[in-house]
Image (spheres, rainbow, N blue to C red):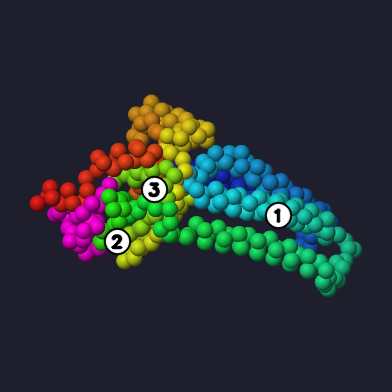
Amino acid sequence: MTIVLTIAVLVLVAIAIWQMTKIFELSQIKADNSQIANDKDNKYNGYLLFGFLIFIYGITIFSFAKYSKFLLPEAASEHGGEYDLLMYISFVIIFIVQTITQALLHYFGYKYRGEKGKKALFYADNDKLEFIWTIIPVVVLAGLILWGLYTWTNIMDVNDEDDPLIVELYAQQFNWTARYGGEDNELGMANVRMIDINKANVLGLDESDPYASDDIITKELHLPVGRKVNFRFRSQDVLHSAYMPHFRAQMNCVPGMITEFSFTPTITTEEMRQNPEVIEKVKRTNKIRAERAALGEPNADPWEFDYILLCNKICGKSHYNMQMKIIVETEEEYQKWLEEQQTFGQTMASMN
Ligand SMILES: [Cu+2]
């Protein structure tokens, strides 16, 4: 409400100033009513150009200083570094080109402003110049694209080398479920048509499939550090997208088909909590939370960093809250946790 009122006041003040200038103009008898820009106008507009240049540089510096802290911490997966490097190099190139071209654009706009008696030079073309400004972007863009394609094929190569852990991520409005292959590391057959809520067969596993009985269904995603994980994604209802920002991983979950993605986690949750950027972020968040607690507002409990799986497709009204905790831990911790979980066979047996 305050924002609406503030905007209304600003608009009214602007209208008032505009009206007053008009009255002032009318009161000047010897006003120059010509619509053609004179040297003074052109010079004035030239300076405004410089003003605008300072504005865009200023807002860039301001954004770097103020918002850099919201960037993700170091990548927690093997391929993440490669991905980040590609992005940062692209950023740097865009930044440099943008800084130089904007300065030139605004400077020449000022330098060649209209002046009485000044005539534009007719200059048809210059092959050498055109060659230079074509070949430089071609080389740079081709380089970026080829490097991007190379990185993309590397990242998207889902194969069974290095004994990967097989995990299914199952999406539905509005939660995630994980399924592990169990002892045999092999997922049992599943289909949404076989979902049987009465028997707690929430993922539609084929009860007659021998691979299914040792599958483990969980509501938390535990991953052993240093082991490759091959994810299979399914969706029950609409398009979802499994987004694991700290691992630089995202894959759409499409009803009626299985999509795949693979990565190797390299940093445990405990180690990531010691990362200086993460410590800073936790500190900032908990400061806000402490303020909320003092005011008796909700969501005020102290927060501890955890990796997270988010839905990154707007899939319905509770989309914003479709998330699952990811815990990266040592092999021993992971095995210990796994042993505490019930297998699908055990769940079924307890239902009968
Ligand atoms: Cu979703």
Query: According to the image, label 2 marks what residue?
Result: 237
Secondary structure, mark 2, is loop
Q: Main secondary structure of the magenta part?
A: loop
Spatial distance from mark 2 to mark 1, Cα to Cα? 45 Å
Above or below, comparing residue 149 to residue 249 in the picture: below
For the question of whether residue 196 can be seen, the reply is yes
Residue lying furthest left: 352
Q: What residue did someone put label 1 on?
A: 97
Mark in front: 1 vs 3: 3
User: Residue placed at 48% from the left, 32% from the top?
Assistant: 274
Which comes before the other along the chain, label 2 or label 1? 1
* Marks 2 and 1 in Cβ contact (< 8 Å): no
Quarter of the image where one finds residue 129: bottom right
Q: Residue at x 44, y 59 (%)?
A: 158
In the image, the segment drawn in magenta is 191-218
Q: Is residue 222 above or below residue 205?
A: above
Query: In the image, what residue type sits under mark 2?
Result: Asp
| Nearest to the observer: residue 103 or residue 350 | 350
CA gap between label 1 and label 3 equals: 36 Å
Residue 40 position, x and y percent, is 82, 53
Q: In the rendered structure, does residue 207 fall within the stretch colored magenta?
A: yes
Q: Position of residue 198 (x, y in %)?
A: 14, 54
| Residue closest to the eye, 147 or 98 | 147
Q: Which mark is residue 309?
A: 3
Q: CA distance from mark 3 to mark 2?
A: 18 Å
Q: Is 216 displayed left or right of 266 in the figure? A: left
The residue nearer to you, when weighing 144 against 46, is 144
Q: Position of residue 301 (x, y in %)?
A: 36, 31
| Pointer 3 with pointer 2, Cβ within 8 A | no
